[in-house]
Image (tube, rainbow, N blue to C red):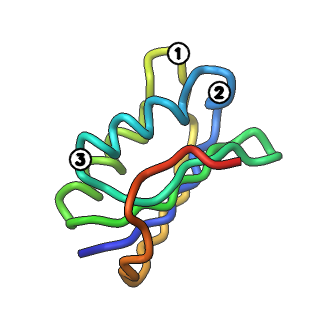
Amino acid sequence: MKRTHIIVKGMVQGVCFRYYTQIQAQKLGLYGWVRNRYDGSVEILAEGDSASIEKLKEWSKSGPPQADVTDLILEDMAYTGEFNSFEVTH
């Protein structure tokens, strides 16, 4: 099991990035949250099996159709098991 923290930069707010991230994470069986940041980026904290985490990272490079991702900041962390769902937070 793995935990990752992702900051997605570019045109990622106002394009349903959080909603699509939640759907993608739920399909992959991941737990955690996604939220907008004040600087215009989107932040994701996700936990789950390593293969699913890697798929979420790969998906985050482009995101939903209207998004224009210019950069990802990735940080792998120790798994904690603290989540029981994947939610959009504020």
What amino acid type is highlighted by mark number 2?
Met
Image location of residue 35, percent across then percent down: 63, 47
Of circles 1 and 3, the one toward us is 3
Q: What element carries label 1?
A: loop
x then y, percent, for residue 40: 75, 39
Helix, strand or loop at mark 2:
strand
Identity of the residue drawn at 64% across and 34% down? 10
Q: In which quarter of the image is residue 23?
A: top left
Q: What's the amino acid at mark 3?
A: Leu
Q: Distance between the residues labelled 1 and 3?
A: 21 Å
Per the image, the residue denoted by label 1 is 66
> Dot 2: within a 10 Å radius of its alpha carbon, few (fewer than 14), some, or many (20 or more) residues?
some
Q: What residue type is labelled 1?
A: Gln
Residue hosting label 2:
11
Quarter of the figure with residue 26: top left
Q: From what the image shows, is residue 35 above or below residue 62? A: below
Which quadrant of the view contains residue 73? bottom right
